[in-house]
Image (spheres, rainbow, N blue to C red):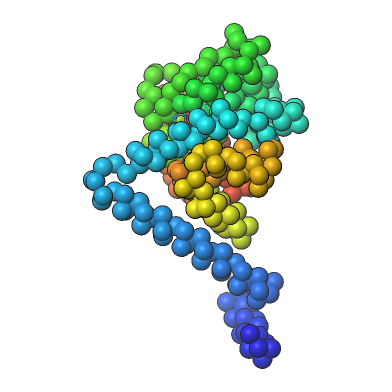
Amino acid sequence: MSFAMLTLLTLTRKIITKFTKLTPFQNIYEEINVLKEQNKFLLFEVSKLNELLRGQTWKNNRIDDQSIEQTHDSFEFQWSDINTGYKLPSDTEFMSAIQENICLITDSNKEWFKGKKILDLGCGTGRFTYGFLTLGARVTACDQSKSALQQAQLLCHQFADQVTFKQIDILTWNEEDYFEMVFCFGVVHHTGNTYQAIENAAKKVKEGGKLFLMVYGFPESPTDFIEVNTYESLRQKLRNFSIEERKYFLEKKFGIELAHGYFDAVSPKINDLLTFPEIEELLKSFGFASIKRTLPSRNYRIIAEKIVVN
Ligand SMILES: C[S@@+](CC[C@H](N)C(=O)[O-])C[C@H]1O[C@@H](n2cnc3c(N)ncnc32)[C@H](O)[C@@H]1O
């Protein structure tokens, strides 16, 4: 771009900004970079939609059966073969602050948890289950992954009388049981039916109780776009790798400490991205109020209270 063109562009932007009162970008290069990243993201989204449509019309079957199976297998492998690293139970720094972390993301104080009945839905290897137990809660910890549950059980062995472990599928688990808090961190967007998973989690909350969800958010800021595009690029690169090859690649590229996090983010096929207003509307329709985000991060940390009807 020539100097004259650049000057003209900058001038035009200044005039537009003055009359429309829109916030300008710091400079034209920043604006171009943001547009490039947004464009890249839209292309990924369009290609995924096309793929979804193709899959659905191909045999007139439910498209997600194969993706659900892949996602399930990916978690099973992740928990049996890449189960140490950053922010996992092996991370002593993370675990030493687990109570404070729980209080922060659920907007509750430590005393609230004592004696409370909590459901850790999609508990993985039990880092939060452990935290709830140390806070004095009684916990039911559930996951579809056998390997995850075995490790969670080991992690929490000293609290055996306070905790029950169950292997369940959140989409079909319909046992009648109610909890003062249902905690569901990073699960519903991997199930293949996010709304159903949220409804099933919501049903298990007692009237007056709390629902906590961590849900992948739809990108908004420039850094969000860069982050999701990084993940999508890796997904595309690794999609025809075997699961072991994926692990090897990520360990080599990011190191053992971060490999789990990257594997978790890029290996499962199902990674739904939702907007906050969409989740808010859904939770309202399930009888929740005081719905709020507890941290200003792209992946929403949401706490909501179930309205008392009677
Ligand atoms: C990203 S991990 C989060 C684990 C845990 N909540 C944590 O934060 O450490 C997602 C978990 O959801 C579980 N999961 C995915 N789909 C599920 C389903 N349909 N039913 C039960 N668990 C499911 C996976 O097995 C996995 O352990």
The one nearer the camera, 205 or 133, is 133
Place of residue 301 in the rendered image (x, y in percent of width and height, measured from the top left): 58, 40
Query: Left or right of 233: which side holds 112?
Result: right
Q: Find residue 10 and report its image quarter.
A: bottom right
Place of residue 199 in the rendered image (x, y in percent of width and height, measured from the top left): 41, 34
Residue drawn at the location 62% of the way across and 47% of the way down: 297
Q: Residue furthest top?
A: 161
Above/below status of 30 relative to 269 = below
The one nearer the camera, 235 or 101, is 235
Q: In this view of the protein, can residue 62 be seen by the observer?
A: yes
Residue drawn at the location 49% of the way across and 22% of the way down: 146
Query: Left or right of 240: which side holds 33?
Result: right
Q: Residue furthest bottom?
A: 4
Place of residue 271 in the rendered image (x, y in percent of width and height, measured from the top left): 48, 44
Q: In this view of the protein, can residue 209 be seen by the observer?
A: no
Query: Left or right of 99: which side holds 79?
Result: left
Above/below status of 38 relative to 285 = below
The one nearer the camera, 164 or 104, is 164
Q: Residue furthest left?
A: 60
Q: Find residue 117 and report its image quarter.
A: top right
Q: Quadrant of the N terminus?
A: bottom right
Place of residue 39 in the rendered image (x, y in percent of width and height, measured from the top left): 51, 66
